Amino acid sequence: MALYNAPVRDAQFILHEVLRVQDATEVEGYADLTDDMTGAILGEAGRIATEVLLPINETGDKQGCTLENGVVRTPDGYKEAYKAQCEGGWPGIDLSPEWGGQGMPYLVNAVVGEFASSAAMAFSMYQGLTHGAIKAIEAFGTDQQKQTYLPKMVSGEWTGTMNLTEPHCGTDLGLLRSKGVPNGDGSFKVSGQKIFISSGEHDLSENIVHLVLAKIPGGPDGVKGISLFVVPKFIPNEDGTLGERNSLSCGKLEEKMGIHGNSTCVMNYDEATGWLIGEEHKGLRAMFLMMNEARLLVGMQGLSQASIAYQNAVDYATERLQGRALDGAKFPDRKADPLIVHPDIRRMLMDAKCFVEGGRAFYYWASTLIDEEGHHSDEKTRDEAGLLIALLTPVVKGFLTDKGFETTVNMQQVFGGHGYTEDWSQSQYVRDARIAMIYEGANGIQALDLIGRKLPQKGGAGMQAFFGMVKTFCKENGDTEAMTEFTDPLKQGSKELQEAVMWFMQNGMKDPNEAAAGSTDFLHQFGYVAIGFMWAKMAKTAQDALAGNCDDPAFYEAKLKTARYYMQRVMPMTATHLARIKAGAGSMMALDAAAF
């Protein structure tokens, strides 16, 4: 069986030494985030990930879900694991105490979620999607809707979904055909078919609360006419107990490349009873609150699969004997040296290590911005954090999933032929990671969103804020000789990112194809600089620790060596992406469609 050791030490390093969350007392709840407190929470979350979730990951992959007479059965062990999660209060760790949650910062949920997703990504999706549905109801639902649904969903007794995609429309939601017809009593008859609905039907909870996008007849055309409805599997009685079964069903389970343990459903709504969430024709506003949180979650999924794939590849590379080191035998008493002595194996492992650890810091930093936006004491700081996290969300989603998948493939390569068989777990990580590049807005859409919406938002204030942070850090630390090897490449990468922004401003306004052609390159370029910023901060933190009386010098030395590798071997990719952006759309759009 695969191994997984939750990176509690690394998480603690990022939280308390790099981000110094305990000092951010202006953010509600952060003063309580002591090293001891987070250590206890993360230690227990790591134990559960290893002992409870990891054992069902392979089972879920091999068994998958089954649909029998309209009922979806989850794989062996899922019910028990879900019950254990609920009894431990994990579904509501960062949710409001008003509804039964523990009220901790979003950041804590983000770290715990990474551990759970690494150990069992498909399983953790049941809980993750419910979290987003809760946020949408809390923000836009009526008091009655909140009282009816939130306590049960926060406890995990009920789960939630989001229903957007239809057979004929995905990204272009203006084409959707599902309808919500008023009943005259405040409820609606919701009809239509939705596809690719994660956790749409299952046997883990007693009720499933579906949030469904549909159009009210007579409303505006396109996306301006979309409304959001809450459509429960069982209609709750006034006392909160379950009433009659609603007229909705799972028509099919999708046959998928990965995440077999999660029930991805075709959902049919046949005049099912639903209630409006928020205002008529304003459904996208509510759904995008849920969608934006889901995009951060998906970015974490890419990171999580890279993390567990990396751990298992390191274990394999240190045990598997294959050939001799080119500069002489490292283990002359053995018949061969382990794989890890070979430079090309080191290349793949170092690429993975600097992505996983740097990506983790990036994701945690982004999560602190969620807390700042929602709970900082200063309004201006809240607004600035909101602008920055809006800018970074497509980068978190797109870059961490693109590079996360690439990392799982490279870790599979470390195993050679064994990685291609189902006797080992690397194939599952590749297959599970692949979906993260596609759902919650395919990564090409994330890139277009970044350059078309987020980059110019408020005159580019978010982008300028990011550049300002990098500039300030480099100015404060660039004069230190020991830091120049980290700050100089970061400054160069930031300069090239700024060049790309200027190129888009000069060319993208004249021809939108010029901007679109370079959008994915820009997203990746931004990702490299963002993670480079994290590595520079981690290098500074490690140097400071080594200059004092640290208890674990090997840990900090490893950080410095990994940061050095990133700056020398990875950060130069920003120049490559800049060259591709400046090449423009000409050669990309030159071929007639028939020539393909």
Image (cartoon, helix red, strand yellow):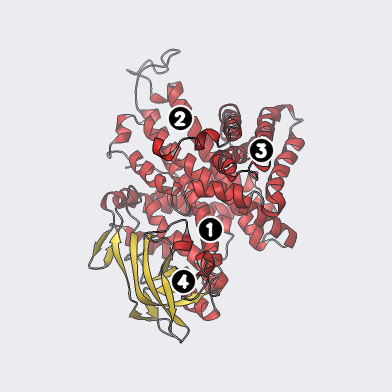
Q: What residue sits right under mark 4 in the picture?
A: 215
Q: Secondary structure at mark 1?
A: helix
Q: Quadrant of residue 107?
A: bottom right
In the image: residue 91, left or right of residue 562: left
Instruction: First in sequence, mark 2 or 4: give its number.
Output: 4
How many neighbours does mark 3 have within 10 angstroms: few (below 14), some (14-19), or many (20 or more)? some
- Percent across and percent down for residue 265 are 33, 61
Q: In this view of the protein, can residue 34 be seen by the observer? A: no
* 325 and 405: which is toward the camera: 405
How many neighbours does mark 2 have within 10 angstroms: few (below 14), some (14-19), or many (20 or more)? some
Circle number at residue 293: 1
Task: Say which residue appears at 38% left-offset and 20% top-offset.
Answer: 337
Type of amino acid under label 2: Met
- Percent across and percent down for residue 413 are 38, 31
Q: What residue sits right under mark 2 in the picture?
A: 348
Mark 2 vs mark 4, CA separation in Å: 49 Å
Q: In this view of the protein, can residue 164 be seen by the observer? A: yes
Q: What residue sits right under mark 3 in the picture?
A: 503
- Image quadrant holding the C terminus, namely top left
